[in-house]
Image (cartoon, grey):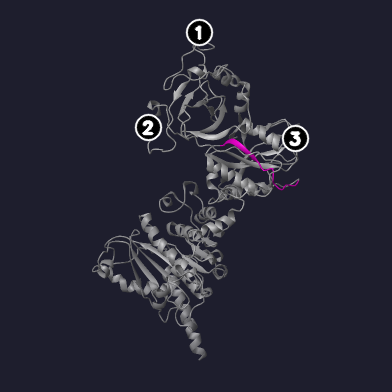
Amino acid sequence: MLPVHVFDYVIDQVGRDIGRTRPEQGGALLGLRGRDVLTAFVHDARAQVTRVEYSNTAWLLDEIGRMEEAGPIRFKGIIHSHPARMPRPSQQDHREYGRTLEAVPDLGRYIAPIVTHDLTTPGERHELFTDTARISFFGAMWTERGVRLEPMRPVVVPLAAALRHAGLSWSDSLPLTTRVGTVPGVRVPLPPGRSGARRYLFATADFPVAPPLLLEEAGADGPHPELIVRELGWDPRIPEQDRLREALGAGTPAPGPRGKGGAGQPARHASASGPGPEPLSATRELPVPDTRTPSPRTPDTRIQDTRIQGARIADAPAPAPLSPDAPLTPSAPPPGRMRRLVYRVGIGRRRAARAGLFARTQGLLSPALRDAHVVLVGVGSVGSYLAEVLVRSGVGHLTLVDPDRVEPANLGRSLFGVRDIGRNKAKATARRLRKVNPRLKVTVIKRDVGALDYHQWYQRISDAQLVVAATDDNHAQQRLNHLSYYLRRPAVFIGLYDGAAGGEIVFTTPGSPCWSCATGGVRESLGELGHQPRTDYGTGRLFAVPGLLTDIHHLTAAAAKVVLALLHPSGGPDRVGGFLTAPLQKDLSMALFAMEPDHWFFPRVLGEAPGQHAFQSIWLRTGRRPDCPVCGELSLRSDPGEYTARKQDEAELTRIQKRAYQERRRRQQHRH
C-alpha cells in the first residue's frame, strides 16, 4: 500500500470544514509537485451540494489557480464526504478521476480521500480519524487496463502538534508551501528574535525524522531582505513529539554573529554517550542557492556563503478564509490570466481545449475542422506524428487502423514511450491524442486492411471526409486507393524510401488520377533515373531501413499540410485552403521530396538552380490511364466489392482488378 504524507493541520481543517457538516461537502487538496504530499486544503464552502452529489465551483478553480501561480504548490486531488455506509469512491467519482488524469498527465496520481461520519467501525490501514469524521484515503492512476483505484496509507506529518507542544501559537492561516533553494516544504512564522528580525521554521514532509531549518531575515532593507538559513540541533534519541521543543530551547534565543555559529552555550541533555542537541543559539548556518537566478550547474553548496542578498522564498498563499458576507458569485481571474484550474481540475477543460487548439492559428485554420473525420491507416513513424499534428490543428474525429504492436525499435522514430511497448499502436496513439484534446472522437481498429471486408470499409470511409494511407504495404495502399476513389473521398498516400533520404506524397480527389496511375506511370518514367523502392516479394511491404526522425517528420509535416488543405471547405482561410489550388488545376498530384543533398534525380533537375542543397521538392503532373479499373472510363470502373483483397500481394490484386475491368467491359460491349 503506497503512502501519502499529510500535514496534521490539513487533517484538522478537513475535520472542521467537512466532518462537522452533513454530506456532501468537499474541497481541493494541494501539495508538492512529484510527491504524494498534502500541504493545503481549500474548502469549497460555496458549492451547490445535495445529500448525494458535490460539484466544484468556479471560485475553487480561481483559488487553486491563484495558489499555483504564487508558488510551488500543485493541485493533488479532491476530497469530499459520503454517507456513513459508503467510505469509498463511487463509480461517478471513478470516472471523474479518469477524466482528470487524462486531461492532466503530469498529475501522476489523483489523491481522492472520502470523508464519512462513521466513528464506530474499526479503522483500516488506509484510514484515520478526527474528532468528527473518518477519512479514507485512495489514489487513482493510469495503468494498461485503464484507471486503477487503490487505498493509500496516510502518514501524518505532526508539524502543528510539534509547534503547540513547544509552546508556540498556531493558526491554520500561517503555514505556506514554499521552497528553500530547490527543496520544497512548509514555512511557518516563529516569534521574532531579540533583534526583532523575523524568523520562520521550514519543515519538509520527512519531519520529524528530518530536522527542520531556521530562516532568519538579517536585515529589512529593500523588498527582499538578506536571509540566513540554519539547521537546528536535532537529537533522534528524543521522542519525536519533544524534538522540536528541545531544539528550540526554552526562550528561543537569538542567533550568534553573522557568518559564524552561535555563542556556543552548553549543550542540554549531555551524557557520557555523547553531546545532546544544540540549543537554538548554537544552530549551524546552511548555504542556499539564489532562487532568482538558477545556474545550469549547481555548485557545491557546502562551501558557499550563507548570506543570500535578495533571495526570495517562493510562497503559495494560504487559502483566504470565507467571510459570512462574502458574495456567492465566482470571482473573476486577474486580467491576462486564464483560469489554470480549467486544466488542473478538469471543469470546463473541454471548452478551453477547443479554444486553445485555435488560439495561435486564428484565421489560418477553419473551426470546421472540429467536425472533420479522417480515417488514418498506419500509425507508425509517419502516421503517429501525422495524427498528432491533425489533432493539434483541430481535427475532431479520427479512425486509427493498425494491427501491429509497439516494439522497442519503434521508440526512436515514433511518439510512443517505454510504457507503450507491447500495446497496440493505434490504441497507444489514441491515448496520447486524448491528452491533447479530451473532446476528440477516436475509433481504434486493431486489424489489417485486408481483414476488413468491403462492407466494413464502405461504412468507415463513407462516414469520413478524407483517408490517409501511411502504411509500408503497397497492397494495402492499392486497396485503400480503390475504396476511397470509388466512394469519392479524397485520399493522401505517404511513402518513404532510401532510408528516409527521399519520399513521396500523392493525393487524389474525385476526377484526379488515382494513386495507382500516379505512382505506376511516374515510376515507370523515373525508374531509369535509379529509383526503385525495395519491397519484400511475398508481402509487398517495404523493407524497414534506418532513417532519421527529422527526415521522416519533414515529409510527414508536408503531408499534414496537404491533408489540412483538402479538409478545408471552399471559401475558407486562403493560406491553408488555397494551398492546393494550383496543383489541383494542373494535375500536380504527386510531390517528390529529397531530404539529403544529391539525392536521386534532383541534381539533374535542380542542379543549375542557385542556392540548392537539401530539403527539395518537385511536384509532378500525373495522368489517368484509360483502362484503369479505379479512375479510368467511368462506365468501366470496377466496384471494390467485386473481389476480396485478403491475403493477396500487389501484383495479384492488380490482376483481379483488371479481370473485373475486362469482365465489365465485355458485358458492356455485349449489351451494345
Tell me if label 2 and label 3 are in contact, CB under 8 Å.
no
The residue tagged 1 is 272
Q: Is residue 47 magenta?
A: yes
Callout 3 amino acid: Asp
Judged by depth in the image, the label closer to the viewer, 2 or 1, is: 2
Residue 642, percent from left and from top? 53, 75
Outermost residue on the bottom side: it is: 672
Callout 2: helix, strand or loop? loop
User: Which range of residues does the magenta coloring cover?
Assistant: 36-50
Q: CA distance from mark 3 to mark 1?
A: 51 Å
Would you identify the image quadrant in which residue 355 lies? bottom right
Pick the front one: 151 or 390: 390
| Quadrant into which the N terminus falls | top right
Callout 1 amino acid: Ala
Residue 568, percent from left and from top? 49, 69
Q: Is residue 212 left or right of residue 590?
A: right
Q: CA distance from mark 2 to mark 3?
A: 53 Å
Mark toward the start of the polypeptide (2 vs 1): 1
Say the numbered circle drawn on residue 437. Answer: none
Say the numbered circle drawn on residue 299. Answer: 2
Outermost residue on the left side: it is: 608
Callout 2 amino acid: Pro
Mark toward the start of the polypeptide (2 vs 3): 3
The residue tagged 3 is 118
